[in-house]
Amino acid sequence: MTLQTLVATSNTSLIQPGFSLFRFGRHVYFFGQKGWPKRVCPTGLFLVDLKGNELKLRPTTFTSDSCYLPPLRYPAVTSLCDNPGGEVSQYLIHGGKTPNNEISQKLYVMSIVSSANKKSVLCCSEKDLVGDLPGARYGHSINVVHSRGKTAVVLFGGRSFIPLNQRTTEKWNSVTDCQPLVYLIDLKFGCSTAYTIKEIKDGRCFHVSLSRNDTVYIIGGHTLESNIRSPNIYKVKVDLPLGSPDITCTVLQSHLSVSSAIVTHTCPDEFLIVGGYESDSQKRMICNKVSLSNDTINIQEVETPDWTGDIKHSKTWFGADMGHGSVLFGIPGDNKNQNSDSSFFFYVLNLGGEEDLMQSCSQGSLEEQEDSMPLEDSEEFTFLGDDGAFDDDTYNEDDEEDESVTGYWITCCDGCDLNINTWVPYYSTELNKPAMIYCSKDGGHWVHAQCMDLSESMLVYLSENDIKYFCNDHAKLERGLQTPKKMVPVLKPSMKKVGRKASINRMSTVKKSFLRRLFD
């Protein structure tokens, strides 16, 4: 068991709590970046490059038929193998929080393919579900079970926003534990079924879940309502006969009370649990080995790593499983190290004895660096086919927009008093950012709809009909500069004079006699 300190360099400023790691063979990929993807890597996935003690993130590519995958924090992630005990061929990703603080309810399938030039390219597809759909959530778990030659996915726990009809201005972003339902998903047909298990009475979040054959063990986790980390273990057994599936649950007692822990797979039936929290203010510094055999689970405490002083004194930590018994985790730093590209200190904890971890990640990343090409400026979100990769070191954090200047929290007018620390939603369409509208004056600029005293119906009307808008400061000026339209004169009909009879032409007797003789 070894602990190695890393020096964060290229693109590591994108790493934040709640990230995930995918391992395909020798390649480890980072997912869940800070903020939305930029043009240098619109896929939002990076190859982890460990060379010596340096940590770098290098942009990766997707196949042309891949769907869009937003950056997600705290999603439920699990691996799929073609054969039990074989190499990982796919990853399932469900839920998670986007950079806009929205919670996803979609299920994605991530795989890796080899291109014509033998470079590894990722492929992402969205899986449509029918039936009892698991709602949007984060901090939950997803596992794969095998029974009677069939495969199913078990999803449990997590947190989500409170129901929409209960949300008020004061608690608009409040979250609650999801219902304690167990979802069974058939990946082949996309059918999802929810089961109520009488032994599971409370929802859990940020728990550890382990699976072996037809059984899933749910360990630890935090319950928001009672603010406890239960030591009970839920043993969920899934039977997949020809008819309806059967799910049973057994409650086991243990001494393992933890949330937000990291689990890594070392052997086919052996796992190691590290990190996490025993309480809201107490980190869990010990490690445990979990052995699964038949219908039993055995948890033992193992040797504690030689933690550094920074780790011991840090109040928080976070990380993810790199596979093969290795864990990447970070702690907040003071960013005094000039060689660091991040505000965190990062470490690799090797629990499984994979001595060539650094070498394998480095070799994998070198293959991706060859024949790289930069992105075209016109590409907002680009997928690559078989013959290209992104420039690996072109990301510059200085290119990121400062939202305090150019984003939602600008001073849009003289009377603007919106503050990021005191603002509360004003319109029903707002969540965590104020609604804005574009003023078309000169070069154009954005203003807060609330500062312009726009009603919600007017705001929706302007947005839906694409009407040119001018803010309060420029509306009067714009009207004054407009050239008056040329008015066509209105033709009025002549009026008869009142009180005067119209003259009647009468024919004389002589004329009548003349005309009579003329036509006779």
Image (cartoon, grey):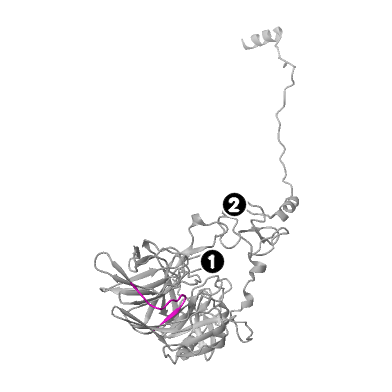
Viewer-proximal residue, 186 or 171?
171
Residue 80: image location, x then y, percent: 37, 76
Dominant SS in magenta: loop
The magenta stretch is 251-265
Viewer-proximal residue, 134 or 274?
274
Q: In the image, is residue 264 part of the stretch drawn in magenta? A: yes
Q: Label 2: which residue?
A: 456
Residue farthest along the left direction in this orientation: 242
User: Crowdedness of circle 2 by 10 Å Cα count: few (<14), some, many (20+)?
Assistant: some
Instruction: Judge whether 477 appears above or below 53 on screen.
Output: above
What residue is shown at x 57% (from left), y 85% (from top)?
Answer: 310
Q: Describe the element under mark 1 as helix, strand or loop.
A: loop
Residue 168: image location, x then y, percent: 55, 56
Left or right? Give the position of 424 relative to 200.
Answer: right
User: Crowdedness of circle 1 by 10 Å Cα count: few (<14), some, many (20+)?
Assistant: some
Please state, as top left, top right, bottom left or bottom right, where the N terminus lies in the image: bottom left
Return the mark for residue 122.
Answer: none
Q: Mark 1: which amino acid?
A: Asn
What residue is shown at x 58% (from left), y 53% (from top)?
Answer: 460
- Asked whether residue 119 is in view, the answer is no
Left or right? Give the position of 182 relative to 169.
Answer: left
Of the two numbered discs 2 and 1 on the same chain, state the one appearing first in sequence: 1
Q: Based on the displayed image, in which of its 4 quarters is residue 215 positioned?
A: bottom left
Return the mark for residue 101.
Answer: 1
Instruction: Judge whether 85 appears above or below 249 on screen.
Output: below
Instruction: Judge whether 478 appears above or below 33 on screen.
Output: above
Q: Based on the displayed image, in which of its 4 quarters is residue 110 positioned?
A: bottom left
Instruction: Judge whether 130 appears above or below 483 on screen.
Output: below
Please state, as top left, top right, bottom left or bottom right, where the C terminus lies in the image: top right
Q: Distance between the residues labelled 2 and 1?
A: 22 Å
What residue is shown at x 38% (from left), y 80% (from top)?
Answer: 88
Q: Describe the element under mark 2 as helix, strand or loop.
A: helix
